[in-house]
Amino acid sequence: MNQQRDGTGSSTVDRMLSVLASKVFSDLWSYQQEHRETLVERGLTRADIGDIASKIGQLYYSLYLRTSKPGAILEAYVFYEAIHARAYFDEQSPRGMAEAVKALKFYARFIIVCLLLNKKEEAWNLVQEFQALVSAFELKFGAGAAGEWQVVVRDAAAFLNADFAMPTPRSPGAYIQYRPNLRCSASSAEASAGPHVPRLREVVLAAYQPRQVKIAELPIDSFRMALALEWHDARLAGPSGNSSGVSGSGDVDADGDGDGSAAAAARAAAAATDAAPRVNGAGAALASGAATTAAAAAAVAAAGDSPYRQITFRPSAPALLHLLASTLMRLRAKDVLLVHLAGLGHWSSGGLPKAGSSGDDASATRPSGAADDADAAAAAVSTLSLLPSEPEGGGPPPAAPESLGVFLSSPSGAAAGVPLADLFISPGDLAPFTRRQMVLVVDSDASRAFASLSLSESGCTVPPLCLLSPPHRPSALREAAATGCFFTMALTCPVMAMCVMAGEVAPTPGQLAALEQVLDDGCAEIARTLLAALHPAAATSSPGAGVPGGGWAVAVEDALLRQLVARFVFVRAALSMHVAARGRDDCQPSAVPELPLAVGPGSAVARDAVLAAARVFKREGLFTPPS
C-alpha cells in the first residue's frame, strides 16, 4: 500500500494507525473506568491499571518519535507522570516477575520521555528510583534475571552524563540552573536570519558505535539530531520535576498535535477517579491553559511543521535501504530529505590497522585481522589518519586503505552468518535515492568516501549536499564513547561542543548562558552572510543545476537546515583554528559541494564568531587563525 503524503509531513497510513490505536486504548480505558468495581472483584490490580495507562503513554511516545508533534510527547508525559504520582507500580502487594518487569519498563520509558522534554532533574530522580527498583528485583529474582536491567540503569546514567560540562543536580530534586535547548526556536537569531521556506520534509537517522551512549534503542547521536531538527514549542519549556510544568497538551488529533490542556487538570481528574488521566477521543480531556498553549502552538505553526522522521537503531543495510525507498515515495519534487549516518568506517583490507589503532586518539583497542569473517570485519574498522606500516625487507609500501562505507551494525554480526555486505552502507547504496534533494550528514572516520555522491553527474539525479565529519578526532576533544560523536554534538549543541574545544569542564550557569548568546549571535551573522553569498545562485539555479552554491541556496531557505549549515561553518572554523587540529587536514570537516568563500574557515565572519565564543572562557589562546 503506497503511503500518500499530506502537507504536514506525516503519512496516511500513520494517521490511520494512530486513530485506530487511540480508539482501541480509549475504549479500553473507558471500559475499565466504568466497570472498575466489578473488574477489581475479578482480580484487576493497580498494576494492571498502570500497565494500561503505560501502554497509552507508549502509544503517544511512538507517535511523537515519528511526527515530532509536541502534543504527542506531552500526552505521553501526562500519563507517565500520573502513573508515577499515583504509584500504580508500588510494592505493597506481592507480585511475580511479569508484574515487576512491567514496572521496570515503565521507569525506562518515563526516563526517556523526561529527557525528550528536557526535564533533567526529574530524569535524575527517576534513575535513582529505577536503580533501587532494579536492586530489589535482583534480591527477589536473582542476579541473572536482573543483569539486563542493570545495563539499562547504567545506560540511563551514562546518557545523562554524556552532556559534557552541563550542570547536574547537586542533590536529589535540586534545580538545574542551565539546560541547553536543542530544539530550533522560530524566534532565535539563527532561524530569523532570513525568511523560512519549509523544504525539509523527511529525516532518517541511523547510528552505531561500539560502547555507544544510548538509552533503550535511542543512541545519543540520533537523539541530539532529532531534537535539533524539530521546532521548539513553548509548551515543552515547563520547569522540571513539577507536574505543573506541562502547561497543557490537549486533544491529540490524527496528526498527533493538540490544541491545549493542562497536565494538572488531567491529574486532578485522575485523583478523582483513582486512575491515570482519562482518554477522551484521541487525547486527554481539555481543561485549562488553552489560551496559553494555543498561542504557543500558533507560534510554531507559523514556522511550519517539524519534519517527519524515522529513527533506526543498528539497522541492516537492506532494512535502511527499504526505509529510504519508502521515504522517497512520499517526497514531492521540491522537498528535501536529510539522512544522518553516524558509525565506524569500513575499510579495505589492503591496509589493516594494527591492534590499538583508532579514529579517536583515546578510543579502545580494536582487533587486528583474523581468518574468520567476524574478525576480518572487525579489523576492517580503521581510521583514515593511519597509514600502513613499511613492509619488512624493503619494497614499495602497500596501498593506503580505501574507505568502503560506514558500519551501522556491529561487524561481529558476520560471526552469526550475517553477510558482511548487510552490515554497512556504501556511497553507492545511496545513489538511487538522489532523485530528490538529499542533505547527507555523515559522522564517521570514513565520511569522506561519501563526497563521491555529490561529484557524480547524472541527468536523473540531484547531487546530494554533504556535511562530512573530520576523519580523525584528537584526544583533546574527548572520547566518543563518553560524550557521543563530536561532529554531531557541534551541529546540534554548539554550547557543549565549544566547552569541549575550550577544555572547560565546569563552567558556571552564567558562563553557559553568555556562551549561548554569543554563539546565537555569531551563527546568526554567519547565516546572514551565507544567504547574501548564495542569493545570486538561488535566483538563477535549481538544485543540481551546476551553478556553484545552487543546491545550498535552495536548502538554506529552510530555517532548520540553515541553522545546521551555520553551525557547520562555525565548527569548521573552530577546528581550523584549534591548537589540537590546526594544520591537520584529517581533523577538518568538509562540505560537498563547497560552501561560498564568504563563510569559509578563514572568513572574517567565522573567525570572529569563534574568537567571541572563546573569550567567554578567556581561552582565545587555543584558537589561532592558520597562517
Image: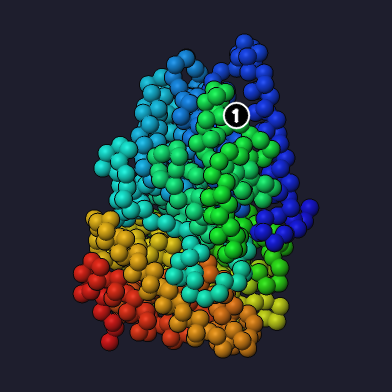
Coloration mode: rainbow
List x then y, in percent, for residue 448: 47, 73
Crowd band around label 1 with a 10 angstrom C-alpha radius: few (<14), some (14–19), many (20+): some
Q: With 277 as the anchor, is 189 left or right in this view?
A: left
Tell me if I can see residue 183 in this picture.
Answer: yes
For the view shown, which residue lies furthest in the right direction? 1
Q: With 65 as the anchor, is 363 left or right in this view?
A: left
The amino acid type found where label 1 is placed reads Ile
Above or below for 363 versus 472 = above
List x then y, in percent, for residue 253: 67, 46
Q: Residue at x 63, y 80 (%)?
A: 543
Q: Residue at x 72, y 59 (%)?
A: 6
Q: Residue at x 66, y 13 (%)?
A: 38
Viewer-proximal residue among 13 and 187: 187
Q: With 280 as the anchor, is 501 left or right in this view?
A: left
List x then y, in percent, for residue 62: 59, 45
Q: Residue at x 34, y 60 (%)?
A: 496
Above or below for 339 versus 268 = below
Instruction: Give the image quarter of residue 301.
Output: bottom right
Q: Which residue is mark 1?
A: 52
Where the C terminus falls, by quadrant?
bottom left
Viewer-proximal residue among 251 and 365: 251
Instruction: Give the image quarter of residue 8.
Output: bottom right
Q: Secondary structure at mark 1?
A: helix
List x then y, in percent, for residue 523: 41, 73
Above or below for 52 versus 410 = above
Tell me if I can see residue 317 in this picture.
Answer: no
